[in-house]
Image (spheres, rainbow, N blue to C red):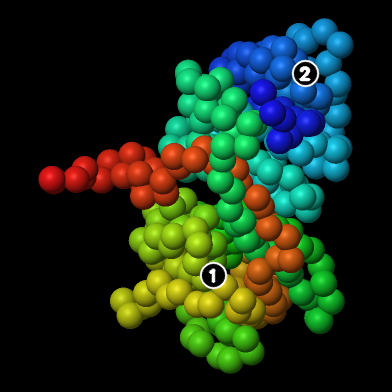
């Protein structure tokens, strides 16, 4: 079999029986076909593989040609935020629930994976966003997000007040529970649950989705993906405010702070089987109707 990849990184959800089983099966298959295999350290502790090469997630980004992530979309997001800094393809094996980002089924993995490793695949670049918190003009914290950055209060059902600017132009002020700024990748996640639009992955766009706004005229809006979105927090807000990146990383925000959200310089290269069809994924995951004729 022709090898289009030489070094494969295996990343999986630690202490998850299904993920461990898949890691063992993949390691056996890859070893039999003479691939160099790197196992991410957090999952390596929950599987027993003799003479395995254990390394960090950043080491996999630096050394591997392809990373296989075993888990749900949440675990895929965590790995993707780190791997976006490196020129590495990423493919997911679904051990979660919906699995919008994880193409391969753990029950039928070897055949499609063998085709991908032989070069029978397609890839796409997904952009990510950066959220930055400024206080008195100085950068206090920052992090990346694959799906979305969410401004919200630190406690449930607590209203906050803020202004929104697009490329320096004032757009609106709002009193609401918060605001979701979503990438096309994240449009089928938290944003969709809040009534936001589904954006196809090839769009260079961002959606802004209000969370329980205190005016009925507040509606989701889609802006150019290259826009710089600035949120100015009113001084009258409570002190426990946050920006959540993909629901994993929390940035603390104070009244009067400014939050800048914009496209990152990094992208994620997702690798898919040749028969991957985005609309088929939507139909399957969202239980849409099939063709009538």
Say few, some or many: other residues with alpha carbon within 10 Å of mark 2 (under 14 / 14 to 19 / 20 or more).
few
Residue 18: x %, y % from top left: 56, 17
List the single residue furthest toward the front: 2
The answer to which image quadrant residue 33 occupies is: top right
Which SS class for mark 1? Answer: loop
The answer to which image quadrant residue 20 occupies is: top right
Q: Residue at x 76, y 9 (%)?
A: 48
| Residue 74 in view here | no
Which residue is under mark 1? 204
The answer to whether the residues at label 2 and label 1 have Cβ atoms under 8 Å apart is no
| Residue 98 in view here | yes
Which residue is under mark 2? 34
The answer to which image quadrant residue 164 occupies is: bottom right
Q: Residue at x 50, y 62 (%)?
A: 202
Q: Nearer the viewer, mark 2 or mark 1?
A: 2
Vertically, is 120 above or below 167? above
Which SS class for mark 2? Answer: loop
């Amino acid at each position: 079999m022709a090898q289009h990849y030489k070094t494969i990184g295996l990343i999986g959800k630690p202490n998850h029986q299904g993920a461990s089983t898949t890691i063992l099966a993949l390691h056996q298959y890859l070893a039999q076909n003479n691939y160099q295999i790197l196992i991410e350290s957090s999952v390596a502790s929950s599987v027993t593989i003799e003479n395995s090469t254990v390394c960090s997630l950043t080491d996999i980004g630096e050394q591997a040609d392809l990373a296989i992530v075993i888990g749900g979309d949440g675990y895929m997001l965590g790995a993707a935020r780190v791997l976006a800094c490196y020129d590495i393809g990423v493919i997911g094996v679904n051990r979660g629930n919906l699995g919008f980002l994880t193409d391969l089924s753990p029950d039928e993995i070897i055949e499609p994976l063998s085709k991908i490793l032989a070069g029978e695949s397609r890839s796409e670049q997904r952009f990510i966003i950066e959220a930055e918190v400024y206080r008195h003009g100085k950068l206090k914290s920052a992090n990346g997000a694959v799906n979305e950055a969410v401004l919200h209060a630190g406690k449930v059902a607590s209203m906050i007040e803020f202004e929104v600017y697009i490329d320096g132009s004032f757009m609106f002020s709002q009193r609401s529970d918060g605001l979701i700024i979503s990438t096309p990748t994240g449009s089928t996640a938290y944003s969709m649950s809040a009534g936001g639009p589904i954006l196809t992955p090839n769009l260079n766009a961002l959606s802004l989705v209000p969370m329980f706004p205190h005016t009925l005229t507040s509606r989701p809006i889609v802006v150019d993906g290259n826009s710089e979105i600035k949120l100015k927090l009113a001084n009258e807000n409570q002190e426990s405010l946050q920006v959540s990146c993909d629901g994993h990383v929390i940035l603390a925000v104070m009244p009067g702070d400014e939050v800048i959200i914009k496209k990152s310089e990094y992208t994620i290269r997702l690798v898919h089987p040749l028969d991957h069809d985005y609309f088929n994924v939507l139909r399957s995951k969202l239980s849409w109707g099939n063709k009538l004729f």
